Amino acid sequence: MSVVTREAPVVLWFRRDLRLGDHAALLEASKHSKHVLALYVLDEALLKPGGAPREAFLYGCLEKLNDQLGGRLMLARGDPATEVVRAAREIGAAAVHVSADTGPYGRRRDAAVAEALAEHNIDWVETGSPYAVTPGRVTKPDGSPYRVFTPFFRAWTAHGWHSPADTGPSLVDWVAPLNSPEIPHPPRISAALPEPGEQAALEAWHAFLADGIETYDEDRDRPDREGTTRLSPYLRWGCIHPRTILADLSGDDRTGAKSLRSEICWREFYADVLWHRPETARENYDKRFDDMKYDNDREAFSRWCEGRTGYPIVDAGMRQLLAEGWMHNRVRMVVASFLVKDLHLPWWLGARHFMKHLVDGDLASNQLNWQWVAGCGTDAAPYFRVFNPTTQGEKFDPQGDYVRKYVPELRSVPGKAVHQPKNRPEDYPEPMVDHAHERQVSLERYGKITS
C-alpha cells in the first residue's frame, strides 16, 4: 500500500451515493486528505439498460450534487478502468475512495479499476455501501446465506448498523477538475419525475416522518392513497442512505415504523441474495423453473406494456409506470402476476420492461421481486399465489380512485363498479383473457415442474 499523507489529494468516486450527508466514504477520504476530487463516470454499461426516465433523474441528481460542490464535480465518460485512473493521475492522487458496489457488474468493474490503479501505486479504498448492512455480512451461524426473509430480518436486526456519518460539503477542500464535460441535458420524456437530489430526498423523508409514518402500515398497500414513502428513487441513487432513515426510526415502536424497517430490510435481503447468487439477476433462483413452459405472444406483451389488458387495476399500474416512472408496490405485484400467470410470459420480459421505465430500477429488488411473483425466487411455494386482478382492485382500490386517475376511459364509472367487466364503456378493451381459466393453466404448468 502506498503512503498517504494529508497533503496528497484523493479521489472520491461517486456511484450509488449521490449525496454529501451521511457519507462513510467521504468521511474516510477526509481522514486521508483535506484535498478531494469528486468524480462521476458515465458508464455505458450501466446507462444502456436503463431508459430515459432513469437517465433524466440521474442527470438531475448530478446537477444537484454539482451545485453542492460549488461546481467542482468532475464528469468523465467511458470505461471506468481507464477514466478513474486518468482522473487520479491528473491530480497526483494517492488513493481512490468509494462506497462498495455489491452488484454483479459493479464487483467485476471495481476489481478491474483497483487492479489498474495498483499499477500506478494508487490505493483503492472501499468504505460503506448503499445498504445499512453490506450484503454478505449477515449469515447463518454456519456461515451460509439466508434463503428466507424472516430469519434474515431477525439476524439483520441483531447485527445492527453504524450511526450516520457526520459529513457535508464543507468537510474537505474540493479539488477543481482540470477539465470536465458538462452534465448532459436530460432526455425529453413525458414522465413526471420527482425532484432529484439530496435535499429533495431529505425533505420527502422528513415530510413522511411527520405525516405518513403513523398510518404507513395500513396505507402502504393502498394505491388510491398517498401512503408510501416515495423514497425508492432516492434510495436507488443514494440521495439518502437507509442508515439515515433507520436512525430516525430508532426507538420508534409504532406499527408504521416497524413496517418501514421491515420494508428496508426486504431491500437489503434481496441485495444479500444477489451477492451470494449473482446469476439470479438473469437466471431462476429455483433451477426447477428452467423447465417451466412459457408462451411467446408478443402482441399480448405489447398490450400489457401499454396498459390495454382490459383489467383496470393492471392497466392503471402500467399507465402509471409510463406517466411517472414509478408504480405503487402492491400494483407491481398485481401486474407482474398478470404477465406471468395470466399471460404465461417469462418474468424476465417484465423485469426488463420495469428496468427501462422505473426511476427506482434496482437490479436486486427488481429481479428478485419478479422471481418472487413468478414462483422461482426465494419464497417456498409462491406458485400457488395467483393474484386475481379484479378482487385485488376491489380490495386495495375500493372506490376505484386509483383506476380512474390513470385510465381516463373509466372515469365515468363510479365507485367500486369500475373494477367489474359489465360496467366497461365501449372505448375500453374487453378483458384479453379469462382469469379463472388462465389460473388453472398456470397451476397445471407449475405442477409439472414441482411435483
Image (cartoon, grey):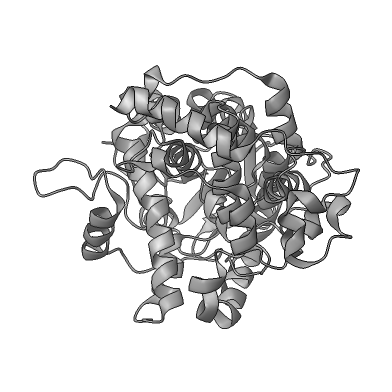
Residue 369 location (% of width, % of height): 46, 43
Determine which quarter of the picture holds residue 112: top left
Residue 219 location (% of width, % of height): 57, 71
Measuring 45% from the left and 56% from the top, which residue is drawn there?
34
Measuring 61% from the left and 17% from the top, which residue is drawn there?
296
Residue 16 location (% of width, % of height): 51, 46
Q: Nearer the viewer, residue 264 or 315?
A: 315
| Residue 229 in view here | yes
Measuring 72% from the left and 55% from the top, which residue is drawn there?
419
User: Does residue 438 appear left or right of residue 117 in this picture?
Assistant: right
**Screen quadrant of the N terminus:** top left
| Residue 230 in view here | no
Q: Nearer the viewer, residue 130 or 427?
A: 427
User: In the current view of this chain or complex, which residue is farthest to the left?
Assistant: 142
Residue 280 versus residue 415 in the image, above or below: above
User: Does residue 426 appear left or right of residue 400 in this picture?
Assistant: right
Residue 76 location (% of width, % of height): 63, 33
Residue 22 versus residue 431 in the image, above or below: below
Determine which quarter of the picture holds residue 318: top right
**Screen quadrant of the C terminus:** top left
* Count of marks placed on residues: 0
